[in-house]
Image (cartoon, helix red, strand yellow):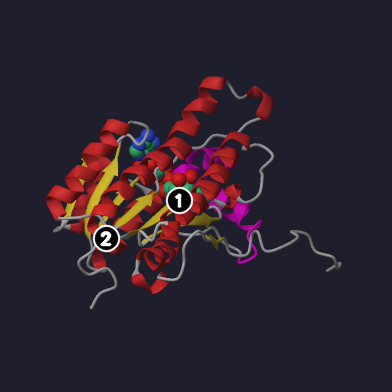
Amino acid sequence: MSRLDNKVALVTGGASGIGRETCKLFAAEGASLLVADVNESGGEDTVTSIGENALFQYLDVTNEKKWEEAVATAMDAFGGLDILVNSAGIGFSGAFEDTSLADWNGLMNVNLTGVFLGCKHAVRAMKKTGGGSIINLSSIAGLVGGEDIAAYSASKGGVTMLTKSVALSCAGRGLNIRCNSMHPTYVDTEMLDPIAELFGGRDAMRAGMAESVPLGRLAKARDIANAILFLASDESAMMTGSAMVVDGGTTAGLPSRHTVK
Ligand SMILES: NC(=O)c1ccc[n+]([C@@H]2O[C@H](COP(=O)([O-])OP(=O)(O)OC[C@H]3O[C@@H](n4cnc5c(N)ncnc54)[C@H](O)[C@@H]3O)[C@@H](O)[C@H]2O)c1
């Protein structure tokens, strides 16, 4: 028996990074996959790398109509919906007071409203099929603030609290639907491309950013996908409303040394 045998999963952001790695791992564990993204060629690449039991679905997570279509596709093509991973996300950095309203709203729409819409339509489908597991990608920035990522951090903090509320709402009505949030440290994906540019290259970025991670490296997409797999599977049956941190110790405590080397 594989860990996700007979399960149907919809993964947003499936064209890249954590979402893509999650799709590949889920498929290896027996799930059928609806790979959803606005990036069609990247999404098709993910599907090709999986082979059987995977379909690409164009989905802009800010568009409610498209959510209805995506969930209907999963139900029609695979006969149900057991797992939703909300991995689609965007970010930018800069001084808080220089953030335009358009940029703020654009980021909130994808990172927070997109997750709300996903939870809403997945829960409606899962109510019909008897249960499920939802995993929302937040961030360590959804637990603590960041000096130059106010909009991103606010959106991810919203995801943290939305997750707990969805979890309680479903548990309170005995729906057998669990909802947990995932909080990675820096993950070596395309999302960090702009930061790599600031460092003058990917290797310099990896070395520079690893200094703020107690375990001494950036996370790989696989590190996060492994933890998402646990939350998606029945092994985490007693977990709902939790915030799982996969951060190499980044948020465990005070960053500085108190002894001189
Ligand atoms: N990479 C990190 O350091 C890091 C750290 C913590 C949390 N996260 C979170 O993890 C999630 C995945 O990040 P990643 O590193 O894989 O990023 P990524 O940039 O590699 O992938 C994000 C995917 O989301 C898709 N996307 C963007 N807007 C969309 C929309 N409106 N509708 C549908 N798809 C859309 C993109 O096309 C892309 O394929 C994000 O929510 C991110 O905020 C990332």
Furthest residue toward front: 173
Mark-to-mark CA distance, 1 and 2: 16 Å
Judging by the rendered image, the residue that carries numbered circle 1 is 166
State the residue at coordinates (86%, 67%). 260
Task: Say whether disc 1 or disc 2 marks the residue closer to the N-terminus.
Answer: 2
Kindly state the secondary structure of the residue where label 2 is placed: loop
User: Residue 200: where, in percent of width, then height?
Assistant: 56, 41
Q: Is mark 2 within 8 Å of ligand 1?
A: no
Residue for badge 2:
130
- Asked whether, in this view, residue 68 is left or right of residue 12, the answer is left
Location of residue 173 (image quadrant): bottom left
Residues 127 and 261: in front is 127
Q: Which residues are magenta?
A: 188-215
Q: Is residue 39 visible?
A: no
Q: Where does the N terminus fall, quadrant-wise?
A: bottom left
Image quadrant in which the C terminus is located: bottom right
In this view, 233 is above or below 79: below
Q: Residue at x 19, y 43 (%)?
A: 72
Asked if residue 43 shows in the view, the reply is yes
> Picture coordinates of residue 114 (x, y %)?
40, 38
